[in-house]
Amino acid sequence: MSVLDSDERFDEHSRRSNSQQRHGSRTEELLLQMSNRDTFVRFKEVQKSYDGEILVVKNLNLDIERGEFVTMLGPSGSGKTTCLMMLAGFEPATHGEIYLGDRPINAVPPHKRGIGMVFQNYALFPHMTVNENLAFPLEVRRLSKSEIASRVKRALDMVQLGAFGDRRPAQLSGGQQQRVAVARALVFDPDLVLMDEPLGALDKQLREQMQYEIKHIHETLGVTVVYVTHDQSEALTMSNRIAVFDDGVIQQLATPSDLYERPENAFVAQFIGENNRLMGSVRGIEGNHCQVELDNGEQIQALKVNVGAVGTRTTLSLRPERVEVNPEAGKFPNVFEAKVEELIYLGDHIRTRASVCGHSDFIVKIPNASHHAALNEGDIVKFGWSMEDCRALDVFEAPN
């Protein structure tokens, strides 16, 4: 990477930020719509730099409703954890203001923000019992002994650990320790709970179980939750809305279904779920659709989402489950010959890799059902898909 002086670095970051934010027009519309709702958490023009030169969070504007479960999702280094740390008070914002309700909290110390926090490493006191761990934040707040006992019991019952109060953390499994950490974050009835990749240390089955438990606790209590993860399945399972971060900018803010079904740019399309990417050039535009010529000369009809004028480059995004094998004649405008290269049995579906349209890594998910014809490696078949399922987006730039 070339070495830039301080001013050039900020100029470069500004150009990249402006370019990325143009792709987020729908995100900005959602933020405007939120302005008339019961906003509880607000980031207003927030920036963060650790060295005075490089911005790791760039002009963040985000409103979160009271009682909402919002996940900040993105790859490592995208700025999501930094945003959570600024909200918690562990990191100061370089510029801008953060609000809880109508109260600016930039100058409020962490222990006076009334925020519950759940960490990936649980952060339980090893020398204390489970009951004592949960009682600690209540004792700091000078509650009576009877009130402390009542709240601790209620919190442990909520996470189904009522019989484990006298044990120490080392006597619990990883999942039980995580439940204790969740209970401790909720025991003093905070209006806001922050969770920083709390399930990262658990195995796959336990992680999925905890996703549902956290989701049900949120639905029961109605507490506002801001959750940080790089795991898209966690975000899709638990969230009311997801903010997808990349390079310090929210690329898209939407519900889980909108993110998956209607990604606004190529980064979101490839980051959320599995996705076939086909590169080409726009050859014609008619209403909401466009004709794209792939690099191998094939012509594809697609939904025009985030493309420039005729002649500009585009990335076509197509979900593997939206491709049909050997469709009826005339059913789809896009039908191409394909060669089956690999079949992987995954129980509920067959993951099929094929060569089509000049790509040997084209993926199709075929449901494991009796009415679907069996395929063999080396078969020559037809793949078809609709215009609406094939989204024409901006040019995808793979990370270095």
Image (cartoon, grey):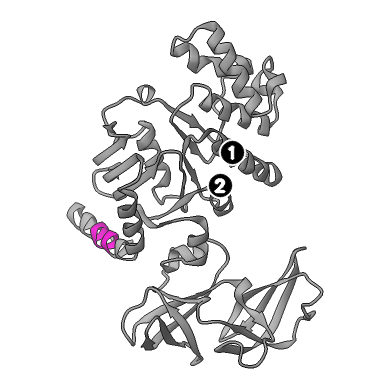
Q: Position of residue 100 (x, y in %)?
A: 33, 34
Q: Which residue lies most toward the top here?
A: 145
Residue 381: mark: none
- Pointer 2 with pointer 1, Cβ within 8 A: yes
The residue lying at 80 percent from left, 79 percent from top is: 374
For the record, the magenta segment spans 12-18
Q: Amino acid at mark 1?
A: Ile
Q: Give the residue at mark 2.
A: 238
Q: Secondary structure at mark 1?
A: helix
Q: Position of residue 83 (x, y in %)?
A: 37, 42
| Relative to 376, 382 lies left or right | left
Query: Which of the two residues, 87 or 28, is positioned nearer the viewer here?
Result: 28
The residue lying at 59 percent from left, 38 percent from top is: 214
What is the distance, in whole Å, between disc 2 and disc 1 at their CAs?
Answer: 8 Å
Mark 1 packing: few (<14 Cα in 10 Å), some, or many (20+)? some
Mark 2 packing: few (<14 Cα in 10 Å), some, or many (20+)? many
Query: Which of the two residues, 75 or 150, is positioned nearer the viewer here?
Result: 150
Quarter that holds the C terminus: bottom left
Q: Amino acid at mark 2?
A: Met
Residue 214: mark: 1
> Which of the 4 image quarters holds residue 102?
top left
The residue lying at 57 percent from left, 71 percent from top is: 319
Q: Secondary structure at mark 2?
A: helix
Q: Is residue 252 above or below residue 185?
A: below
Looking at the image, is mark 2 or mark 1 earlier in the sequence? Answer: 1
Quick check: can you spot residue 152? yes
> Which of the 4 image quarters holds residue 232?
bottom right
Quarter that holds the N terminus: bottom left
Q: Position of residue 4 (x, y in %)?
A: 23, 57
Tell me if residue 153 is in the magenta stretch.
no
Quick check: can you spot residue 398? no
Q: Which residue lies most toward the left here?
A: 7
